Image (cartoon, grey):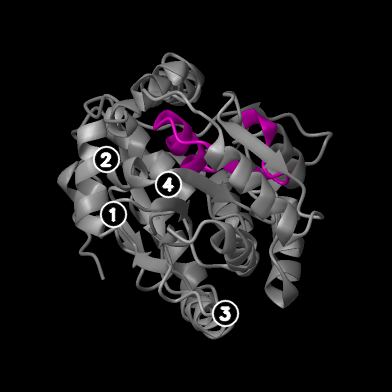
Amino acid sequence: MPKEKKITTMSKAVRVLHVFAGLNCGGAENLVMNLYRHIDRAQIQFDFAYYKRFSDYFVREIQEMGGQVYRLPPPTFRHFFSFLFRWWRILSKQNTHRIIHGHAQATSIVYLFFARLMRRHTILHAHTTHHGYGGKGLARRIFQFPARFFAHTRLACSQEAGEWLFGKKKAFSIFSNAIDLDRFRYDPDEAKRQKEQLGMDGKLVIGHVGRFSREKNHAFLLEVFGQFLARNPESVLFLVGDGPLKHPIAERAKEQGLEDHVVFAGFIPDVGRLMMAMDLFVLPSLYEGVPLTLIEAQSSGLPCLVSDAISRDVIPTSLVHTLSLRENEQVWADKMVEIANRPHQQDRSHWHLSFRDTEFDIRIQAIKYERLIREPIGNQRKGNR
């Protein structure tokens, strides 16, 4: 559990408390960390609260940049009153967070309600377009609905995500996911080194980056790759990520006789270098918000095949090809063969420039976020005069 340090009130920096379920290396967490690295931290500081165990990947970096980290009890039936008390204590005893920015939507009704009671400015941020499945999905649907009424500012990564969380009657602003473009600029020498180090030299590398969870649709991806492999025996499926379904997917790969052609790389933070080793990026997700991985892949000049469940907002280049999930595995494999055999621009190093000075450029979004934070603070100061 991360140690909490006492925050001094002498600092002039405005402290924003970001709330997540966990500090995994997911899209929402990466967006906020990218912002944290690029904002003026003398003026704005980030603190973080989360409640999932074993999800503290960013804790050390946060503390090194001056941020505070709070790990709360899980909001389960057994620990729910401890969860409520902990939130009350954080917001009432440490009167340092003037803005609460929520990314954990299932519990947002709790912390946004407390924050409003204590006259803090509240932000709720939509990052996805689906509640999930089963009982947990139903619970999220029930608890997320009233949260829209407790947010002063409503943000969404896309139009679809905003309408999903806030409805069509509540106003919200689009705040696009963004990356550090220079980290994904293609380098042919680095690409060659990566393929050699990974033992994939001379192979056609089909890449996928994502958590092993139901929405990423890995089972379908395996079926598609099996069809593709039959026509391209010198190919390999390179899967980057971890998650609860990793072991079942690995077992399925063995059952399908694909174990010698599928690499389970696990979690690797520097995906920019890995993408240089890929030849085609495939993302057959059942649902998404605005996947950072797709922006990263395009910045690396990587041809992509994605499902039509992914927002068009994140497909600004000709590198991306879309197929419906209603199409079968053979149709997807045929499209992969078509893309792989197509003569692509040999120089992949210029594609990151397509995103320069756009909403996908983290430098632009950091400036936008600073303005977003300064506006309510300015209004609070006027109200206190």
Tell me if mark 2 has few (under 14), some (14-19) or many (20+) residues whose alpha carbon lies within 10 angstroms of its own: some
Q: Earlier in the sequence, mark 1 or mark 3?
A: 1
Mark closer to the observer (4, 3): 3
Label 4: which secondary element: strand
Kind of residue at badge 3: Gln
Tell me if mark 1 has few (under 14), some (14-19) or many (20+) residues whose alpha carbon lies within 10 angstroms of its own: some
Label 2, on which residue? 191
| Numbered tag placed on residue 58 in the rendering | 1
Instruction: Report, in whole angstroms, how far the alpha carbon at label 4 lies from the one at label 2.
Output: 36 Å
State the quadrant of the N terminus: bottom left
Instruction: Tell me whether circle 1 and circle 4 mark residues in contact (CB < 8 Å).
Output: no
Q: Is residue 3 magenta?
A: no
Instruction: Report, in whole angstroms, how far the alpha carbon at label 4 lies from the one at label 3.
Output: 43 Å
Q: Earlier in the sequence, mark 2 or mark 1?
A: 1
Residue at x-position 71% and y-position 32%: 159
Residue at x-position 67% and y-position 43%: 310
Label 3, on which residue? 256
Q: Position of residue 278 (x, y in %)?
A: 39, 46
Q: Position of residue 129 (x, y in %)?
A: 70, 49
Q: Position of residue 220 (x, y in %)?
A: 65, 65
